Image (spheres, helix red, strand yellow):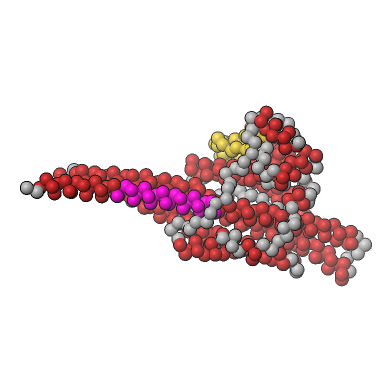
Amino acid sequence: MEGERRASQARSSGLPAGGADGESPGGSAPFPGSSGSSALLQAEVLDLDEDEDDLEVFSKDASLMDMNSFSPMMPTSPLSMINQIKFEDEPDLKDLFITVDEPESHVTTIETFITYRIITKTSRGEFDSSEFEVRRRYQDFLWLKGKLEEAHPTLIIPPLPEKFIVKGMVERFNDDFIETRRKALHKFLNRIADHPTLTFNEDFKIFLTAQAWELSSHKKQGPGLLSRMGQTVRAVASSMRGVKNRPEEFMEMNNFIELFSQKINLIDKISQRIYKEEREYFDEMKEYGPIHILWSASEEDLVDTLKDVAGCIDRCCKATEKRMSGLSEALLPVVHEYVLYSEMLMGVMKRRDQIQAELDSKVEALTYKKTDTDLLPEEIGKLEDKVECANNALKADWERWKQNMQNDIKLAFTDMAEENINYYEQCLATWESFLTSQTNLHLEETSEDKP
């Protein structure tokens, strides 16, 4: 009944009834231009289907509903609980659609920055309207990411694009850079919207719906400076102590993250190098067409042949440009996003260890009676619950993230392989057509010369 009611709401709001935002599984494909790295990648990281027995060391009994109950920030309204259940029972049902578009430059006496329009369409009952439109700058996205990490320390928060660009890349307000960032911010919000827990976070809702002054007022709420400093000091102290007995499953998880980080960073570097070499090849090839046209002006007997060669080069240039576009839009962003994900995962593991380290220190204090032991049993009980909740949340989210990672990377490599096949077939057909025409022309000239 609830599914029918929700589908009816979606139709009345003019929203589609379901479907994921551009994510689907794909098959394995070799990395273009680097057979050695692709073999290494398939063997150790990306070919997880064959190594499932080695990597599946986590409990499959921990459901996403278990994870939902771990955060005190989660809404507990009946509608929210129903929505969370629907993610398991009807994963294709989607009731929150977010679009990031229309970047706009703002210049003040103090700074220059870009804002992005965010349009949200929803059929959820907890929203006051079915459609919202706000503008946000990059700092607002950083604030949202920080609030999500604060409310859900051991959930895997989607990464944001870097704040500062790498030296040697495009300038900060270059149109290509702005468009690349817009796409990354769009993916960031939609990954949150598709997450079974983060999608119901109250700060996320405020981010999508509040006007600029309302968001600014909301940011000022929360713990004060001294409270935040105290939390930071405790976190640093816990990290300095370290974890004495990290559970075996999290040791395996940490080893996977370290290996994945090494491999995905290597692939990122290789793919960037391939793109750079493709760009240099394209820039050089573009010069050969005009050169053959100029050459034809001084060779009366070869005018048609040289012009045909120039035409073939021009068609190959267009095919190369299309392949470069596919590389820069399909493969490079996906690989780099998972480079950022590897950094996020290390942060998640660190926060989990800090929670356990705090529990270990209390247990040690009680064991050696280093402090007043009257309150310690109660504190230890609360910390044990906190550690259990953090562990279960991470285990459940880990399985979800790992499956998405496999699908995303396999799809990106499959698409890139298809692009390469189409490219080589097009170039081959171009030159075969040229050779056929030249052969036929030669035969005609030969037959005319015969008495």
Which residue ends up furthest to the top in the rendered image? 12
Q: Nearer the viewer, residue 235 or 52?
A: 52
Residue 292 x %, y %: 24, 47
Q: Nearer the viewer, residue 150 or 225?
A: 150
Identified at 71% across, 47% down, the residue is 88
Range drawn in magenta: 410-432
Corner quadrant of residue 114: top right
Which residue ends up furthest to the front in the rendered image? 451
Is residue 435 toward the left or the right of residue 402 in the image? Answer: left
Corner quadrant of residue 124: top right
Residue 360 x %, y %: 80, 65
Identified at 55% across, 43% down, the residue is 183
Position of the N terminus by quadrant: top right
- Position of residue 384 relative to residue 173, above or below, is below
Secondary structure, magenta segment, majority class: helix
Is residue 95 toward the left or the right of residue 43 in the image? Answer: right
Q: Is residue 414 magenta?
A: yes
Q: Nearer the viewer, residue 147 or 250?
A: 250
Can residue 244 be seen in the rendering of this structure? yes
Which residue ends up furthest to the bottom in the rendered image? 368
Residue 429 x %, y %: 33, 48
Identified at 17% across, 48% down, the residue is 443
Disc tally is: 0
Residue 416 x %, y %: 47, 51
